[in-house]
Image (cartoon, rainbow, N blue to C red):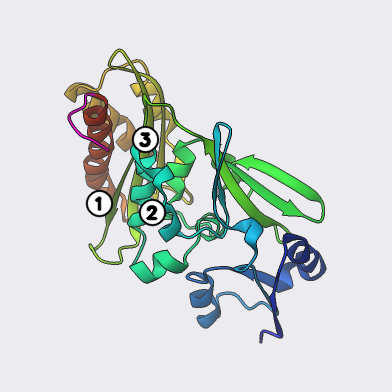
Amino acid sequence: MDIKKVYNSKSVEEVIDLLGEYGKKAKVIAGGTDIVIALNKNVIEPEILIDISKIEELKGIREEDEYITIGSTTTFAEVVESQIFENNLYGLHKACKMVGSPQIRNKGTIGGNIANGSPAADSVPPLMALDSIVTLKSIDGIREISLEDYYLNPIKEKELLINIRFKRPKDNQILTFAKLGLRKALAISRLTLSSYIEFEDKTIDSIRVASGALAKFPMREKEVEDYLLGKSLEEKTIEGAIEVLRNSMDERLKGRSTLPYKRVAISTILREILEEALAIEEGVKAW
């Protein structure tokens, strides 16, 4: 199927109207780092392309009261360069900095990383650990859904991903991220973990752990969260958390050829995010 027309849209309303008119015949393009490859390989064959890269409403990072909102066409490079993502939001900065090459970070967008639906999307685990909310818009109205639930009810044909937002962490809330790829340069994530931990008197008072590439889509690791809640991060606790995650993986990835590798690899990156959070909490390591 040949592309019949490319629309260089100037507004969200124009995009919504086009998606309402063309439905599954249309595809949205922003950075293009994923969709161009899919087009070249004939994985997708839309009749219409809608370019949203110049719509100002979808760009940028905003602080509004206690929330931080990231527009869907905000690039990974813009996140990395923003001072907002220093200190206790460094886990998201780190995830975006580890995406592909500089060229990909300059073009690839946060919205595309979410909407593409890859289980190995780098930015998604830290955003999920932050308990983020995704805003989608269509001719039927606005739909807001947690990023955790989004992958169970993802973007529909006539919807446009507008932004993603989350509460700014407090000083005692720490976001970490770790990634294990097949190679150091341009590595597509084979395993990612992010943790969001609030300490109280050296024990874990609140925790969210999110993974990438351990299932069909990024997800919260609630069995690990339940195990760690109320505990201090001693060696035996970390070892226990690793065993809990391995048991969960055994059930989830039963029969998969990647399971033996991931059982070993998971111990490295789960230990990394937990030990990093502890080191920051104790003042041994700066952000």
Residue 70 versus residue 214: which sits nearer the camera?
70
Residue where numbered disc 2 is placed:
80
Circle 2: residue type: Val
Q: CA distance from mark 2 to mark 1?
A: 30 Å
Residue 26 in sight here? yes
Q: Earlier in the sequence, mark 3 or mark 2?
A: 2
Residue 155 in sight here? no
Q: CA distance from mark 3 to mark 2?
A: 14 Å
* Residue 123 drawn at (x, y percent): 43, 51
Specify the segment rendered in magenta. Answer: 282-287
Residue 286 is covered by the magenta coloring? yes
Residue 148 versus residue 139: which sits nearer the camera?
139
Quick one: SS at disc 3?
Answer: helix
Circle 1: residue type: Tyr
Dominant SS of magenta comes to: loop
Q: Quadrant of the N terminus?
A: bottom right
Query: Which residue is located at x 82 percent, y 69 percent?
Result: 21
